[in-house]
Structure formats: C-alpha cells, structure tokens
Image (cartoon, coloured by chain):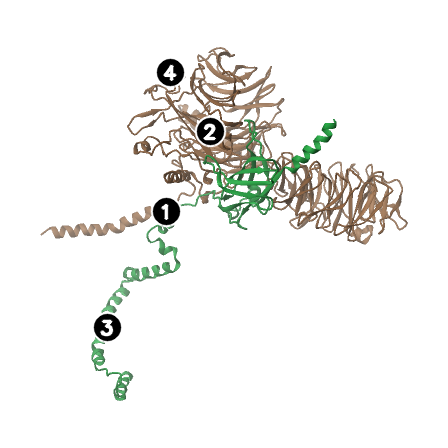
Chain colours: A green, B brown
Amino acid sequence: MFVLRFVAPVVLFAAIASAAGFSGKISNVPAEFKELFHEKNVHVVNGNNYPSRIQVDLIPLEGQNGAKLSKIGALVDEEYQFKFDGLNSGEYELLVDSYDFILSNTRFRVKVDAEADLVSVFDDFLDSKTYNESSIVNVSKSAPLIIRYQDSKQYYERASGSLWDMVLSSPLGFIFKNQTYTIIFVVCLVIMIVPTAVSYLNPELAESFKEVEPQVAERRIERPSRETPEVIRKPPVASSGARSSDSSARKRR
Amino acid sequence: MRIGFNWAFIALFIGLTSAVLLEDAFSKEMVNHIYHQFTSYDVVNGDSIVGYTGYGQFIAVKLSDPSYLDWTIDLKQLPFTVDKYQLAKNNQLVYLYSTAEAELFLFDAKSGIFVRSVELSSPPVQIENFFNKGILLLDQSGSIVYVDHTTGSVKVVKKDLPQVANYFVDQRDGFSYAIVGAKIITITSKAEVVATEELPFNDVKDFKDGIAVTTDDQVYKFDTTNVPEKITISNLKNLHVINSKYLYSSDGDKYFLNTITDENTLSIAAEFKADSGLLNIGYHQFALGDFWIITEKTGRKFIYDLTDLLILEDLESLKLAKTKQDQLFSDDFITSLNGNLVLVTVDPNVEGRVYNVQDGTLYKVITSANQYSATNNDYLIIDKPESEQTINEFHHLLEDADSGLVLLRWLRRVKRHLGELGKYIVSFASQENDEQSVLASEGDEFGFGKLIIFYDDVQQALIAINSIDGKLVWKSTGSFSGSPIKLTKLGDDIVALFTQHLYYVNSRDGAIIDVQNLSGEPTDIFPATLEDELDVLILKKEGQFTLVEGPKDSVHDLYLVDHDNESVSGHKIVAGQSNSFKTWKFAEDNEEIVEVVFKPFETRTSSLGISLANKDVLYKYLNPNAVSVLTKDSANGQLKFYLLDGITGTLLSTFEHDANTVIDFSSINIIMDDNWVVYSYFVSHPKLEQRINVIDFFDSDKGIKKGIDSVSPFRHNSTVDSFTVKSFLFPERIISLASTQSQYGITLKSIIAATETGAVIEIPKFLLNSRRIDDRELTQADFQSDFRMVPYEPVIQRNSFSVLNHKHKLKITEQGKILTRPTHFESTSVVCYFNEYNQFCTTVQPSSSFDLLSKNFDRIKLLLTIAILLAGYLISKPFVFNKKLNAQWIDSP
C-alpha cells in the first residue's frame, strides 16, 4: 500500500511530464466557396461546416496486434487547426481526410520523442514502401504542421459534347474565347453574308446594288484619269502662289 | 514510372465515365438523415431546436420542418463523452461538456462549426452565463472560473469554495452574485471578486433579481450590501422567483401570483385554479417579455403575459391567452417564428404545436419527420409489388380473353367498368385517397423505386420506405411479439422472423397475413429456389435447418452451409423431408473462421468466359455452390482464404497471406459474385493501409461445354483450374462492401464500398481485375484479352466522381448495410445504404446508360439535326434535278 501511495504519483508525474503534443493547420483555404448545392437550393447537412467534414486521426503504430485499430481523433476548428496532446513516445500515422478539399498530402508519419518534447513529421505516401525521411518537419503546438489546400473536390462532371463545347474545342475556338475576336469575326461574317442574303431576300435591292457597283467602279476609274495630269502638273514645293490660287478656284467650281 | 502515371491517368479517365453530370446534380439521390429523438434540447434563434440525441450527436433541427437537419456534431469525434451543454446568452455559441472531464468544447450554435476547446484545471459542476461576454463555471475543486467567449481565456475568479452539486448566479446592477453553499460572492463585470459574505442558509433552489428561495420555501431579499433579509410568508408552497417584486407558487390545482409588500411580506396578489387539474407551471423570458405558462392535465395551456404587469405593477395589465384542449407535449418554449411571438410545445421527437402568444390560436402543427430505423440493422430491399388495381385489371383482361362469346365479353367489360366507376365515386365522395397503395405503385414502371423494409423497435412495426423519395410507404398493422431476428422475402410476401413467431406480411400494405408459433431458439431464415424454380423457406434453429415453407413432395434435395467460429459445415435436406442432417465439416487446426460468404442468391451471369486475343475463351469458374471462407491462424494471425464446394465440402482452392502482415480482423469485408471474390482488410504492419484483395477463378480446361447448363450443381466441373490474385491499395478505410446486380447479368459489375470518411464509392470491377499485368509492358494481345485491360497499378485512386452520395456526407457505421437491387433496365441498379443515422438511395450504371436515355439527353439537338438534314435534302433536290437535266443536255449532241 505504501509502495502504491509513493510510486503511483511518481509514475503519474513521469507520464504527464513525458507526454508531448503538436498542432496542425490546413492553410490557404479560401474564405468562400461557390457551391452547387447553393445554386440548386438543395440542403446539405453541414454543407457549409467544412471543418467538421475533415477527419484527422492519429494511429499509434506500435502495439497494434490484429485487434480493432486504436486511434486518436482531433477536432478541426474554424481556422482549420487541430491539435494533439498527451502523446507518448513512439511512431504514429497521421491521416487527414477532407470530404471537400484536395490537400497537399493526407498521410504523414509522426515520430514522438516525449522526453525531448520533439515531434517530427514525415510525408508517408500511400504507395511508397516507407516514409520520406528527407521531408522531416519538426512540429510543436506553436509550430504547426502545415497542410496546404490545393483545390475543392468536384463531385459532378461538367457536361461535355454540347455544340458550344464542340465549337470551343475546334480550331476556331480561340476566336470565341475572346470577346474582341468574336466581334471581329461576326462583323466579317456579316459583311460576307449580307450580299448573298440580300439577293435571296430582296432581289431588286440586290439588282440595284449590282447596278451601283459598276457605276462606282467607273467613277473610281474616271477620277484617277482626270487627276493624274494635275498631279503631274503639280509644282515643286517652292512654287509661286499663282498656281495654288488656280487650283483652289477649280475646287470651288 | 512515367508510363505508370500515364496508365493511372487513363484508369482515372476510364473511371470518369460513370460520373453524374452537373445537370443531374442532387436529382438522383435520396437522403434521409435520422436523428431519432432529443434527450435534452432548447429552441434557439427562432426556428431551430438544438440539443443532444440519444445516438451520440448534438444537432440543430428546423422547428418548422423537423426533417431539415441543419447541422450535426458527431460526439464520437470528441475525446470523451459529453452529455451537458450551455448556450451562450445570445444563443450564438454553445459549450458542450461533461462533469467528469476538465475540458469544454465551444461550437457555433448557428453553423455547428467547432470554435475551440477550453482546458480547465478541474471538471465543471455547473456553467452559467456571465453577462454577454463569457461563462462562469463552478468546478469540482470548489473554484469559480470565468471563460471568455471571444478569446477562450480562463480566469480563476474565486478558489476554496464549498464543493457543492449546484450553484446560483444572479446578475443585476452591473454585478454578478454567485451563491455557493452558504456563501454569496459579488463579482464585477471584469470577473473580479469584490466581496464574499456568509449566508444563514445553504439550500437555495432559486435566485434571481436579489431574491433567493430555499428548498423549504423560505424567501430572502438581498440589499446592495448582500445582507439577506427574510421575507415573511404565510403557507405558500413551490415558490419561484419572477423578479424582485413577484414570485409564483402553486398548491394542488391552484396557482398563485405573489407580491412582496413594502413591509417585506409575501402576499397573494392573484389566485387561479386549473379546472382540469394542474400539470405544471413554467416561467419563460424571451427578448424583453416575461411569460407564465400553465399546463392543465388535458393539455390546455394558459399563457400569461407578465411583461406589462412587471413594469406597471398593475394586475389589470396581466394578459391571458388560452389554447384549446389538445394533445399533451412535454416541453414549452417561447420564441419568435416568422416575426410572431409564439409558444412552442413539443416532444423530444419534434412533434408538437405552435400557438400564438397573443390569442392562443394554433399557429402551426409540428409533425415529426421520418425517424424510422432498424435497431438490429436488418434491412430488406424488394421490388415494389404490383398494386391490387393492376393485378385486378390484368386478371379481368385474362378473363375477357378466355370467354368465347363477344356479347358476354362486352357485358362483363361493362359490368367491370361500372364497378370501377362506382368505386371511384365512393372514394371521391369520402375523400379517401388511398395514398399508401398509390405510393406503392407510383412512378415505378421501370423498377427504379424499391421498398426498403425493416423493423423499428420504437414504433414496434415493420416500416417500408420508398427508395425514390425516402417517404414512408406503409407501416405494418398488427402487433409483433418478441425480438426481431431477420426479414426475408418469399414470393410477394415478407417473412419476419422473431424470437418466438414467424410473421407473413403483405408487402403491399404491411398487413400481417399469417403467424406461426415457433419453439426453440431460431437464429436465421432465408429463401431458396429448387431446381424446378419453386421457392422454399428454410429456418435455422439450434444448428439445424428446417423447411418451413415450400412443396413437401419436391424431388430435389437441398444443400446448405453453416458455420461457427471454428468450422464450416455442410447440411442436406433430403427430398420429401423437412429437417437437415450434417454431411461434411471443414476445420483447420488453430484456425478461427472469420468470414463465410456465398454468391448473392439472385445474382445473374451472362458471360461464361473472356474472349482472348487468340480467339480462344478463358472460361470463368461459375460454380454457384462455391463458398468462400476466410480464417485467422491463431498462432501467428495469418489470414487464409479457402474456396469450398458447398455440396461436397471439397477444398477447391486456397490462398495464404504473408504471416508478417498484421491485420485488423474486425475490418474484414468479403463479397463473392460471378467468378470472383473481393475482400478488404486494414493492415497496420508493415504499413498502415487499406488493402483490397481480388481473386478471379477460371475453368480453362473448358469444363463448361456448349449446351451444358452452367448453373447445375451436379453437372458443373467442380475443380478450379486456375486463379489469379492481385492486391490493391485504397486511400480510405472500407467499412462495408457489396456488388451491383443487374436483371440479366450482362452489365459489368461494380463494387460498392462504404468508407469511414462518409462516402459510398463505386469501384468498377474491371479496375479490380486480378489479371492486370504487373511485370511487363502491355502488348496488343493483352489489350484484346480482357475488357478495358490496363497495367497493374497498386493504388485505386479515390475518384470523387465515383462517390455516389456526392456532397452528402454520410455517417458510415460497421452495422450499416449496402443494399443493391436490379431495375427493369439492364444497365441500371438501385444502390442504397441504410443504418441508424442515414437512409441513402441512388442508381448506378456500371456500363453507362446503354439502354436508357439520360435526363439531359439533348432531344432538341437531335430534332434540329434531323430538321437540318431534311432541309438540306429539300433545298438541294431541285439543284440536283437541274444538274442531272443539264448533264443530259450536254451529253445529248
């Protein structure tokens, strides 16, 4: 009894003294998300409570003997932070799974040295034989393990195969992806199509256009033929004012 | 490595084909979240009920729509069990705690988001609000501790107080007064003690506005110096404080409003009597109003609005509103609903009434949501039965067709139509909409709607839920006695096995058709089909199988398999007999039986083999009597697989895992279908990972010849010629497995996995293919030798497009059940996941929608294309005609 009274507090003290802890944080999480269930006006339980949809488990790797796996859970707070306290020395596997986010890594090997109050974390990818020793990060309650948010998980596929998708993915797609190009393209198309369209819709107008066209062409031909001699007669830059006055008189006519 | 990545990408791409499009989002799935009922709760923020449920959750439910579970906190995520809560004064925050642990958990009461945990030096005894800025708690060491809402900082306000079970806090004049035992402590708004006084009493039951009432109904009034002054009272019982001037009391069916006079005497100001008997009295404060709720034994409520009385101190200003006599509900709350001040009276199952406080009229009836679940987690999925009307119509049509005389047929038809018209008129006049039968047949032409049937212990009834909308189809009538063991289906009826009875239930309306008394201790019941396609029902009782339903004169023997922890045994019921006898036994030394599975009873396989590139066929091993057994070696914890013949007990195949692998045996799930076995298990050594093992069995010696019935147990080649094994890694822990079923077995199989993270995931079987090549590059012949052959990649990536429940995160439990059932479309299967927290159903198309147009099929585009083609044809026709004509002109000379 005496031994128990004396030893138990010492053991308890030693256990408390040799326990370590660390914290973690999911960083770069956007403040707002555009959610489809908002658009569709569908209620999703805890749909906006993203931290509650992140599961963080620390599993001791020593002492697992085929019985039901023991694990230590942690709550994720509104700042996407979590923490573990009272860890004994040993190796653990940290599994972080978010229902909504794609994270930079979801599996870590955690080595705890409680006596030295040292917690080291390593990347431990699923399909690797062992954890990545060069990825060591020493963490503590004040220096959290940082896990980066990469993207949001998409649960629905955007429809493909629509006409518009086909156009966008065609060689002309670059035109329609740019507003200015699209306007230019449409204007050009209209200029090209209008004469043909008019010939079907209003043949008389088309005929009058056709008649106008030769006249305009003739005028164009005529005008240079009259002006050419004048251009030839144009004096050099340092000419007298008499010819200039002559020229302006013709314009007035 | 690069090639591996490429192939992984291809595999991922292949997986995308089954994704649900944005247009169909949230339209395919049915989700019911089950919270059962509250154990302790409050109405907050107008339209919300928050509180603990009996199933380890702290939740918020909409008062106006109890099926609307706003948010939920899974208490299993907390490091210890919490059972108490304290709402902040503004109802925006809630503290969850236990009186056994020195930690508080603070959550946002509007969203359920975890804010922080607060560590204490000693477990709390009781928490009270401290103005609007924090909480004041008394801990087990006798200290009053202040916790700030904003920062979470903890400050010990006063130590060395008496260690009591409860304490009382009153806030007035900018100070907080705490009575702990026989002490009163004055605390400033900065949580600093300014005075501690001894009291002449230590048994306070109510303390408010400077008035303390003791358990023996003595009343004390405190002045500014905290000196208690005893109030003289005359024979008043059950006293409670309203404010510094008024108290209420009750005696029998009478209740009193009492006032403290200037002479410090408590006198009766008004006396009332509950004519129908007084049940309880409650005093409620909401916003700036004070209300006194009197409940009579008949359920009638008297709502006294004390607000003006307390200000004017004039009894004439007391307002009373009476409700009508109604059903009695357990808890009352005053709240504001859509801008109206209302009295909410509800039961823990969120069934109740809402009354206007002004006039006592009924504002709203609160009807509890579907909260049915199977306590024993036994769920049965069945096709919806044809309605009586359809069967009658069919019957009459047959009758009409049989008769030879035209006139007679016409007369019969007229008679039937007149009868139907009469029925319609009667039902229309009586306004009896036979909702249940409508629900049982509505919108079910293609078999998409299924019934999920289970026994609810709380309701003590069989419940049928519609898989399309999650609504109740029927609740069984009649009573069941004993504990439920198992449900099964026989023909159109449901058979429910209870400890002492066997109930036959009509699947259309839940009516009990027949009851059989049972002796002994039955443990299982299941249907079987004889070779002549006759259904029989077999009961397992005390290690023996008995034929309880079916033809007694059948010429076919029945073979059955049973197992316990140590062995697997074969049994036989000889044709013409009812009871079984043991035929064989399989047991290995020092091996414990972990799992025994067979192929699903109704599985279909249409493909007998895999066509190879060399035009040969790799025949599947399709023995329908094969039994898969997983065992654990007691000496070294090694996992072993055995394939047995269920009729002869012959060992067909075996496979052993590495003895150095440490497996969590509680995590093992195994399914068997077609020619394959898939089992999942979680490994803790050498690396923590979820593994899926796939074994495909082949019968390449061509034992199945053309014309031989592949499902005959007697003519089937009973030796496995070869098998292939592959192990895969899955990123999430698998809790439950199942395989999809289709009507004819043509569609590819998919594996449905329910994972710990709350997802029900579809994994195509062609990804879990044990023939994937891992030791060389794939050749053209390899690609042609299997469907969608890809090189072996150990990790099956979690593709979020394959998550069937999409954004709805489910709470997956080990007891939960994945249910699958084919529809009338070969491409489509119904998949459900049911447990005590969720009811989820959706449809899957493992081979895509090859026989069914999807909802977003662009019919307009199709019509437009046809129209354009037609227009092109019509426009070009004259040109073509002219061209041909011109061609003839040219050729003529």
Distance from disc 2 to disc 3, alpha carbons, whole Å, reads: 87 Å
SS label for mark 4: loop
Dot 2 corresponds to which residue?
B393
Q: Is residue B26 visible?
A: no
Dot 1 corresponds to which residue?
B861
Contact, CB < 8 Å: mark 1 with mark 3?
no
Q: Quadrant of residue B283?
A: top right
Chain where mark 2 sits: B
SS label for mark 1: helix
Q: Nearer the viewer, residue B442 or B173?
A: B173
Same chain shared by disc 3 and disc 4: no
- Comparing marks 2 and 4, which lies closer to the viewer? 4
Where residue B558 appears, as percent x and y from the top left, is: 46, 15
Compared with B30, B224 (above or below) is below
Distance from disc 1 to disc 3, alpha carbons, whole Å, reads: 49 Å
Query: What is the crowding at mark 4: few (fewer than 14 residues within 10 Å), some, or many (at least 20)?
Result: few
The amino acid type found where label 2 is placed reads Glu
Q: Quadrant of residue A23?
A: top right
Dot 3 corresponds to which residue?
A220
1 or 2: tag closer to the N-terminus: 2
Chain where mark 4 sits: B
- Comparing marks 3 and 4, which lies closer to the viewer? 4
The amino acid type found where label 3 is placed reads Arg
Q: Nearer the viewer, residue B612 or A106?
A: A106
